[in-house]
Structures are given as C-alpha cells and as structure tokens.
Image (cartoon, helix red, strand yellow):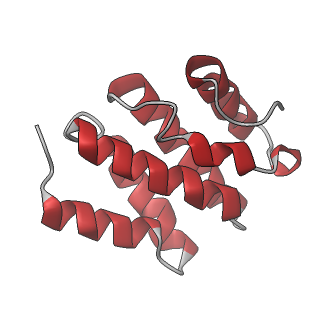
Amino acid sequence: MAIGNRHLIDLLRGLTASVPETRDAACGTVTDWVSAFSPTEAAVVASVVAAAATVEADPTCRESQLHALTELGESASITAEALSPLTELDVRSLQGSEIEYLDYLRTTFGVGADT
C-alpha cells in the first residue's frame, strides 16, 4: 500500500511547518496513516520526524513526534537508519511519555541517546 506522492509531500509540509499546531496535527496524521505507508514512504516520514524531534522547541509537539515514531516502529517497516537523527536528541529535556517512547525506540532499533 502507499499514500502516494501528493499526500506524502503534503504530510511532509505539515511535519515541517513553522506552526507547532500544524506539526502536531501532522504527527496525528502519521499515526492515522501508519499502515498505509509503503516501506519507502515510512522511511522518509520516519527520518523527517526523527530529525524534527531533535530541534523541536514545543514539548507537546515533540511528544507527538516521538509517539508517531513509536507507532511507525510498531507498525511499519522502518529501520534504525531512518531513526538515526535521534542520536542528536537532547534527552535532558524529555519528560513523561517522551522518555518511554525514546526507550522503546532505543531498545527496538538501537538508536537515540541513553535517557
């Protein structure tokens, strides 16, 4: 299955938008569409979300990003390579469920800094 290029580009625009609410909503779309992504689409989305999480200033949005990555990790065929940007995540700023999401990703894929 695949969402197609038009939907992929629209989703990537949302994930990288300047408005936190738009980024947060796009992460919700990722979790809704997780089973619809082709392996290539899942890898692209995971890489963009992982990179975005490392520079995210809004804690709510970062939690949504890590949640979306967890959903992708559980349901899509992504690899540790797609999640490699998480090695740059400042874990000192993580709270609550963000720590749990990163622990899952670290344990499952061997990526991300120790919490």
Query: Which sits in the foreground, 100 or 91?
Result: 91
The residue shown at (44%, 30%) is 79
Query: Which sits in the foreground, 43 or 58?
Result: 43
Residue 91: quadrant of the picture: top right
Q: Is residue 24 left or right of residue 86?
A: left
- Estimate the x, y position of residue 27 in percent, counting from the top left: 44, 54
Q: As displayed, is residue 17 above or below residue 6?
A: below
Q: Is residue 26 left or right of residue 105?
A: left
The residue shown at (26%, 70%) is 10
Q: Is residue 22 left or right of residue 55?
A: left
- Which image quarter is the C terminus in? top right
The residue shown at (75%, 34%) is 99
Q: As displayed, is residue 4 above or below residue 113?
A: below
**How many marks can you see?**
0
| Residue 33 seen in render | no
Residue 96: quadrant of the picture: top right
The residue shown at (23%, 41%) is 37
- Estimate the x, y position of residue 9 in percent, counting from the top left: 26, 68
